[in-house]
Amino acid sequence: MGCGDEKLKAGASLKWLGALPVFYILVFFVLPVAVLVQEVFSVSIPGRFQDLDLWSNTVAVAVGASLQALLSALLAVVVGFPLAGLMINYEFRFRTILQSLIYVPFVLPTLVTGLAIRQMLNGVVSPGLVLLIIAHAYVNLAVIVRVVGNAWQGIDRRLIITAQALGATPLKVLSSIVIPLIKSAIFRAFALVFVFSFSSLGLVLVLGGGQQTLETRLLRQVSLLLDFPAAAVTASVQLLLVLTVLLLAGRSNSRINQPAMFAPQQLPKSMYTAVVVAIVVFLAPLIWLVNSSFVTSQGLLLSNWSLVLQDFQTWQALSNSIEISLMTAGLTAVVGVAAAMTIHSGIFGKLNGVLVLPLSVSSVTIGLGLLLAVRSREILAVPDWLLPSIAHSLVALPFVTAILLPPVRALDLKWITAAASLGAKPLRAKATAIMPILKMALPAVFSLAVAISLGEFGAASFLADYDNPTLSVLLLRLLNRPAVEAAGMASVLAVILMIATILLTVVWQQYESAKNVQR
Amino acid sequence: MKRLFFIFTLVLVAAIVVGTNLLSNNPRASGTVTLLTHDSFVLSEQMISDFENETGLKLKIVSAGDAGTVLSSAVLSAGQPTADVIFGIDNTMLSKALAGNIFDAYTSPEFEFLADSFQNSFGGLVSPIDFGDVCINYEIEKYGSNPPKNLDDLIKPAFANQLVVSDPASSSPGLAFLLATIATYGTNWADYWTQLRANGVKVVGSWSDAYYVEFSKGGGGGVYPMVLSYATSPAAEIVYAEEPKPEFASTAAMSSGCFRQVEYAGVLRGAKNKAGAELVIDWLLSAQVQADIPLNMFVYPTRAGIELPVEFSKFAQPVLEPLSLDHDEIANNLDSWLAEWDAVMKN
């Protein structure tokens, strides 16, 4: 399919590029986990690991959780695919707002989204498998839209136009052209949602109605029973299963795509209802949380807002969240670009598998590992303020790399050859060609990395300076206080978090669509 | 227009970040002592700056999530701790903490001022800092002159389908309630839970779910007038209310069937700043900090003679005969108790 079939020549300049992501994962993930494993062994009775009952119980829980995750991912793809199509192919008035709103359930701490959904559907759907699947699909739609959407955007429009000129119906266009070309992206998105639903904790606790996952089991073993060997068994089963899923997903090679050369068409009037429905669905938690931010034991008042906004700690937490998420985005972008280029150039194709390792492991494990490596054994000399960003970037890396791969693959090598023939040195030639492509993809990279970082509270509560919590951690501390106003104040923080997310993503959408139009 | 919006947002974000950094107070002191605690730890800023001024040390507080995960991280790093002093080990975890050999013995000069019932330091290894009671809370208006009075009431038909509790495996008060039933009914505790289940008790995953979603006075439109919470929850309701404060709380707590939770602090073995750690223990036991604890963490001080805030004396439920279990018994049986609870409640 055009010049994209050639791989970039593996020059010396690219070899060291590949070292960066590998080094990053080795130092900030493998090493801490190794330290943790060693400590676990040193405090455990050896015989415990050979307990067959323990293993079979763990596997049984894993099977149940897999089923739940499978159904969640299926629902997410079924709903997310048309949504992605809508966002990519059409232009309509509220497009930018809807694009940002899709991120909202994804960014909010899962405990908050879970509680909002519980309250909204209290009496309608009770906690259990069905509610959990719906919630998982809802929260992860952003993943589908992003990953599938980006790939869809890379399809050569000429194929579609030609097919339509030959009389193909929209359905035929979808099934013969679109889906085959992006099916690996669909599968990858499916796998990611599977992993998220499998490893989910907050939503399971609030909406699961007693469903057990390996994550809840791990929490119980680490946080209650202090049964470290059992925790190690749970973590191992989790790692094996999730890693297998992600590696299978990464295997499928996508066809090389041409960069998009089209302007989205105006939305036909008949589809307006779909847009309105989508907006309402994504706006619902926002509205609900805004409403509950006014709830006090004496009825609806502004008091929660005045309490929170007058508290200096709120502003500090907001500032801290922004700083951490921007640092996360920076780290992830640099390492992600290096990773994407390395994977595409074929030097280290398996890098994809290495990058998803952190996703296969619970944030508790990463958090404990980093804590031990940095503060206890002092093997790693990392400044404290950088730790949360590092933990977040480990989670964001695989996504960011997935977003960067299509543009890297679509690299028009004629630019490089042209630049080289004009006398530019190889590195300069590649840089000149790469920059426009990356400029196009970086807004998406930044917005996703910031989104992941803003809502994360597991690693953040572990690693951030206690006196200087992030917004999410502050929010969760409030939820532990037994008073209606505390929940109201937590809702205020959730609304602030949402506004921050929407602002940031709207900014980047503007930048992105501006760049698209220019091309 | 888009450009303007972009610049505006950039300026706003920069203002927030720079402004808060300029306005926040970072005292520079010569040494640092690090306190490891859970994410429910709260004290007034004044207490912390008093400590720093009096000792010349910077108090750095680190957390590792909830109390159990904090203890896990301490056990895994025993001898090479990530902090100097730890606070927040409660009686359900104490046995594991002691078995994990994470403490260095230290008896504070303030220890003798603790109330008689708290004079046990388990060989000088830990100091009890605060205590609280987990009790069934209920909506006053709903029950009028016939509120639930003890655990036996909860299985009576008159109180059917009115109670929501949280899962002992994922919620600290949930666990306390399970232990309360074990302390009350001994080996027949599983029968009690069978009857509770038959009487329509609702079990949810977390305390916040139970309180904020299911409880009728939790603001979430819930329909359950009884919820598992703390003896001080009615006081918290008043404390957080906006002025003018209501004269009466809308919720109250049962005085019977309450399980006592005691929180301990201890110097970590191998701490870099052992002297500093000891000063922190003295500070936690001091009269000023003990008096500061109630309105911040909604638990009671262990020191004798501390004056309680008026909201506590008016609205919190005093528990005269709290239930408790031996900490070793808890540690040895927790796994099988939880498994049995699962078997009774989740089929």
Image (cartoon, coloured by chain):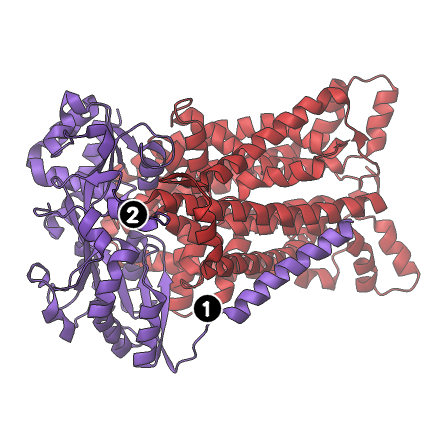
Chain colours: A red, B purple
Across and down, in percent, residue A170 comes to 76, 20
Across and down, in percent, residue A253 comes to 67, 38
Q: In the image, is A366 to the left or to the right of B194?
A: right
Q: Which class describes the residues within 10 Å of circle 1: few (<14), some (14-19), or many (20+)? A: some
Q: In which quarter of the view is residue A213 placed?
A: top left
Q: Is residue A233 above or below residue A127?
A: below
Q: Amino acid at mark 1?
A: Leu
Query: Helix, strand, or loop for circle 2?
Result: helix
Q: Which residue is mark 2?
A: B238
Q: Is residue A147 above or below residue B114?
A: above
Asked if the residue under mark 1 is in contact with the one under mark 2, i.e. CB atoms within 8 Å, the reply is: no
Query: Helix, strand, or loop for circle 1?
Result: loop
Asked whether B165 or A210 is in front, the reply is B165
Residue B336 at least partly seen: no
Asked whether A38 or A269 is in front, the reply is A269
Asked whether A390 or A503 is in front, the reply is A503
Q: Is residue A235 above or below residue A149?
A: below
Please give the name of the residue rendered at 81% of the width and 30% of the height, measured from the top-left corner.
Answer: A265
Please give the name of the residue rendered at 37% of the width and 30% of the height, measured from the top-left corner.
Answer: B221
Asked whether A372 or A477 is in front, the reply is A477
Disc 1: host chain: A
Q: Which class describes the residues within 10 Å of circle 2: few (<14), some (14-19), or many (20+)? A: many
Across and down, in percent, residue A403 comes to 66, 45
Q: In which quarter of the view is residue A433 placed?
A: bottom right
Q: Which residue is mark 1?
A: A380
Q: In the image, is B128 to the left or to the right of A497?
A: left
**Do the residues indicated by labels 2 and 1 lie within the same chain of the protein?**
no
Image quarter where the C terminus of chain B lies is top left
Please give the name of the residue rendered at 52% of the width and 54% of the height, measured from the top-left corner.
Answer: A392
